[in-house]
Structure formats: structure tokens, C-alpha cells
Image (spheres, rainbow, N blue to C red):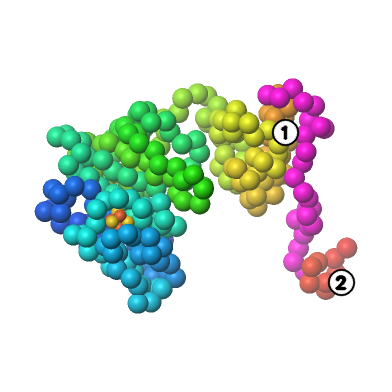
């Protein structure tokens, strides 16, 4: 199930749930890591030893809920985006869920978002209370979302409600970048194709920019007033058009 859909089963979730007693004591990590892979930043980053040192790099995390302070360091360190912090003591009616977030744009503090479950289905509204962004940009952004308490163990993601009609316009199909996201980074000062490529990954998918490149150049030109031919392009590397592997293998039958 997990391998086919990316969604853990209720039985898997049940095994990593903190105890009811621990949930009454404040924020605690919920480690939803179920695949044995060579990875251990959760254990090496945890300052309290709540995530026990791995005997083998392929181990699944072993967690001592009583040593966890809910600091959230492991959330931004986990490359699998598999760790969440749940604080059911946040208020009478709401819980605070801290989730890793790797999309752009990052929602603003105070904004109301659609909170989603593990399958990406919207389950309730949530309010963005706090945003942690790594200064060195080598850690994952973490959002603190206040949600109705009954959804504390359901909410594991967010969607930003669409604000404008440009939100629906797709500029880069390979990397699923909307016109809204492109305009946001241009507004931030990224006005060169290479910079935007590094920021949004446009042009790095299977089509290698054949679709998005002219659209992006046109948008940059419109915003900056520069002629399209004056905007630097990214480097073109061979093959500059799709070719059969037999051509590379050199079987001599292809022109
Ligand atoms: S929240 Fe902090 S204390 Fe708890 S497991 Fe993560 S890093 Fe360790
Ligand atoms: S860092 Fe994340 S993905 Fe890696 S083992 Fe720990 S919980 Fe799993």
C-alpha cells in the first residue's frame, strides 16, 4: 500500500502514535517513517536522544516519547518529510501541528489555508501561526498550523486556497509551476532565466524547458521591460533534441 500510493496504512500510523498520556503533556514528535532506507539525520539531529542512535543506517527510527521536547529540529532535518510535531495542549479547541513544507510560495503567517490529510485531501481549515525558514537554506521550511483538535492526527499538509485566476495557469508542466509562482519569484527579484531555473526547477524536467522557456522569457520581458533577446538563456547541453538510445550506442542504422 505505502509503496504503491505513498500513503501509510492506518495500522502503520497506529504503531507510531504517541500515547494519550504523552499528548496531554505538550508538543511531541510523530515519526511516520516506514521504509528501510539508508538515512539517519533524525537521530543525529535530535538534541535530547529521543530518537535513538541507529545500529544500522537502514534502521527505522526508534523513539522515546518521554525524552522528546517537541523542539522540531528533526522535522526540518528529515529529508523524507516524515516527521511532524503535534501539540494538543495548544488551546482548548485547537491543536498545533508542525509540518515540513517544500513548496512555493510559502504561505504568510496569519493566513488561513486548506489543511490536508496524508492523501492530500482537504479536511479542514488551518491557520498558519508560525513559519520556520532555515537561514542557510539547507533545511526544510516548517509551518506551524493551528487546526481543530479532532484533526491533530489527520492533518499532515496544506494547500493554499487559490487567490487569483493565474494560480490555475501552468507554466512548467514537468515541475508543476504555476504562473502565480513564477510571478512571485520575479517580484522577489529573480529576473534571469538561470536564476528562476535554480529557484523553481523550471526547465529541469523531461522536456528540458522546450515548453516553459519561451513563456518564462515572455513573462520576464513583460515585467522588466527588457527585450526577450536581451534576457540570458540557460546553457544548452547535447542532446538538444530527443534521440533514440541506439543513436548513442552507434549501431550505424540511424542518421
Ligand atoms: S522534536 Fe526535538 S526532541 Fe523530539 S525527537 Fe525531534 S529533535 Fe528530538
Ligand atoms: S531522517 Fe526522516 S526519512 Fe530518514 S530515517 Fe529519519 S525519519 Fe526516516
The residue drawn where x is 67% and y is 41% is: 195
The picture quadrant for ligand 1 comes to bottom left
Is 236 contained in the magenta span?
yes
Alpha carbons under labels 1 and 2: distance apart: 39 Å
The residue drawn where x is 37% and y is 41% is: 143
Residue that numbered label 1 is attached to = 217
The residue drawn where x is 83% and y is 73% is: 251
The image position of residue 16, as x and y in percent, is: 24, 60
Q: Read off the magenta span.
A: 223-246
Identify the secondary structure beneath mark 2: loop
Is residue 174 visible in the rendered image? The answer is yes
- Count of marks overlaid on the render: 2
Q: Is residue 33 above or below residue 197?
A: below
The image position of residue 163, as x and y in percent, is: 46, 25
Q: Relative to residue 65, is residue 228 drawn left or right?
A: right
The image position of residue 224, as x and y in percent, is: 71, 24
Residue that numbered label 2 is attached to = 252
Please name the predominant secondary structure of the magenta segment in the image: loop
Q: Is residue 217 above or below residue 119?
A: above
Amino acid at each position: 500500500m505505502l509503496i504503491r500510493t505513498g500513503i501509510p496504512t492506518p495500522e502503520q500510523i497506529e504503531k507510531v502514535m504517541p500515547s494519550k498520556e504523552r499528548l496531554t503533556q505538550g508538543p511531541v514528535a510523530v515519526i511516520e517513517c516506514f521504509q528501510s532506507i539508508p538515512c539517519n539525520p533524525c537521530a543525529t539531529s535530535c538534541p535530547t536522544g529521543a530518537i535513538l542512535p541507529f545500529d544500522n543506517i537502514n534502521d527505522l527510527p526508534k523513539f522515546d516519547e518521554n525524552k522528546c521536547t517537541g523542539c522540531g529540529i528533526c522535522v526540518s532535518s528529515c529529508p523524507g518529510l516524515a516527521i511532524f510535531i503535534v501539540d494538543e495542549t495548544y488551546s482548548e479547541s485547537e491543536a498545533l501541528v508542525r509540518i515540513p513544507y517544500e513548496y512555493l510560495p510559502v504561505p504568510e503567517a496569519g493566513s488561513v489555508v486548506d489543511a490536508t490529510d496524508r492523501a492530500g485531501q482537504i479536511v479542514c481549515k488551518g491557520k498558519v501561526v508560525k513559519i520556520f525558514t532555515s537561514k542557510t537554506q539547507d533545511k526544510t521550511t516548517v509551518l506551524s498550523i493551528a487546526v481543530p483538535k479532532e484533526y491533530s492526527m489527520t492533518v499532515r499538509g496544506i494547500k493554499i486556497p487559490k487567490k487569483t485566476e493565474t494560480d490555475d495557469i501552468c507554466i512548467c508542466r514537468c515541475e508543476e509551476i504555476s504562473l502565480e509562482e513564477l510571478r512571485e519569484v520575479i517580484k522577489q527579484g529573480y529576473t534571469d532565466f538561470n536564476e528562476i531555473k535554480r529557484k523553481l526547477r523550471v526547465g529541469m524536467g523531461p522536456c528540458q524547458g522546450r515548453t516553459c522557456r519561451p513563456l518564462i522569457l515572455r513573462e520576464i520581458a513583460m515585467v522588466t521591460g527588457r527585450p526577450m533577446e536581451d534576457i540570458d538563456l540557460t546553457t544548452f547541453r547535447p542532446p538538444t533534441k530527443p534521440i533514440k538510445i541506439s543513436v548513442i550506442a552507434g549501431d550505424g542504422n540511424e542518421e
